Amino acid sequence: MSTRQMKSRDRIVRQSFENRLSHWLVAISTFVLIFTGFGQMPMYARYGVASLPGMAWAADYQLTLVLHYAAGAVLVFAVFFHVLGAIVNSRYGIMPRKGDVKESAQIIAAMFGRGEEPPSHKYLAEQRLAYAFIGANVLLVAVSGIIKVVKNLPGIDMNPTFLFVTTAVHNAAAVFIILGIVGHLAAFVFKQNRALLPAMIDGTVDREYAEHRHELWYRELHPEPAATGGAPLDDVPLEQSA
Ligand code: HEM
Ligand code: HEM
């Protein structure tokens, strides 16, 4: 058997192209939004970022505003695309469930060598919580951002208290998103979680990893031979959903 065949035999499909596309559109647009959003508060000139080689543009308010609008449009599109895909394909496996907080604590304790990790579905309980936290704040930042775009249109006059609340929501959600991303990336400091990285790149994960860590999901994809009428495991169609 060639190396390529061996590789494909030992890996299974975890993330569809559609899921990867929405993840990276959200991730890249969010990084740009964070950088350009804080550029609206003229801090890059003040704190010397603009004097770094090649960074003078960061203090150009008009430019950071246009980039903020462009990345905002990409984020809003990606959110629509993701939500629509979930509804059309009835994919809700990443939505939080009852008991997720307790289960997350067990998973984290197990990573530090205390106790056994509970059997997981496609997503670990902590991933479902991370999704809810990041997702809710992305929705808040997008809705408040759209209101701020409307406010900037010529001839629009909005109630100042409403605008104050909108800006407070926009800024608070921005800070929570940053905290969420720090937590999200910190998860990959742990070796156990790193096996998920290729899932967001080529869409696959190691078969053995899935079998052990996402046992409930793996068993759904690959029922015991008896339940498939004796079909070999590799003949069972690979799952592509969230
Ligand atoms: C270089 C940066 C990033 C990397 C390497 C990365 C990688 C990943 C990986 C490997 C997963 C798990 C996929 C799976 O379970 O199959 C994931 C999930 C996710 N990512 Fe990212 N991501 C990055 C940035 C971001 C950013 C900036 C956001 C949001 C603003 C984000 C939001 C999410 C969400 C909501 C999930 C699902 C929940 C979870 O698994 O924690 N990611 N990401
Ligand atoms: C992770 C996503 C985002 C982050 C971190 C972020 C951050 C910020 C920050 C820090 C500001 C400056 C303070 C303020 O005026 O409130 C700002 C302003 C603004 N943001 Fe965002 N933002 C995000 C997403 C969006 C989106 C999706 C839109 C539009 C759909 C948007 C539209 C705006 C507008 C119009 C302003 C005001 C610009 C001005 O009039 O000076 N933002 N954002």
Image (spheres, rainbow, N blue to C red):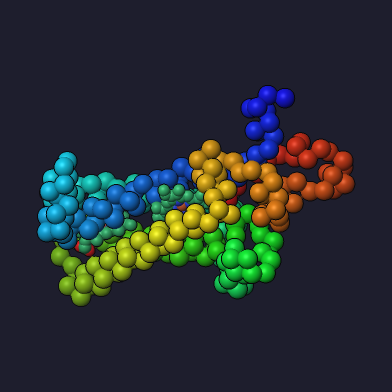
User: In the rendered image, is residue 78 in sight?
Assistant: no
Q: Residue furthest top?
A: 2
At 66% across and 60% down in the image, what residue appears? Answer: 120
Q: Count of labels shown?
A: 0
At 64% across and 69% down in the image, what residue appears? Answer: 114
Residue 171 sits in which quadrant? bottom left
Please state if 146 lies on the left or on the right of 61 as rendered: right
Residue 177 sits in which quadrant? bottom left
Point out residue 72 in the picture as x, y percentages from the top left corner.
30, 51
Q: Residue furthest bottom?
A: 161
Q: Quadrant of the N terminus?
A: top right
Give 41 or 142, whichever is nearer the viewer: 41
Give 78 or 113, whichever is nearer the viewer: 113
At 60% across and 73% down in the image, what residue appears? Answer: 102
User: In the rendered image, is residue 234 in sight?
Assistant: yes
Please state if 95 lies on the left or on the right of 172 as rendered: right
Q: Residue furthest front?
A: 113
Give 150 or 177, whichever is nearer the viewer: 177
Please state if 96 lies on the left or on the right of 133 as rendered: right
Please state if 20 lies on the left or on the right of 46 as rendered: right
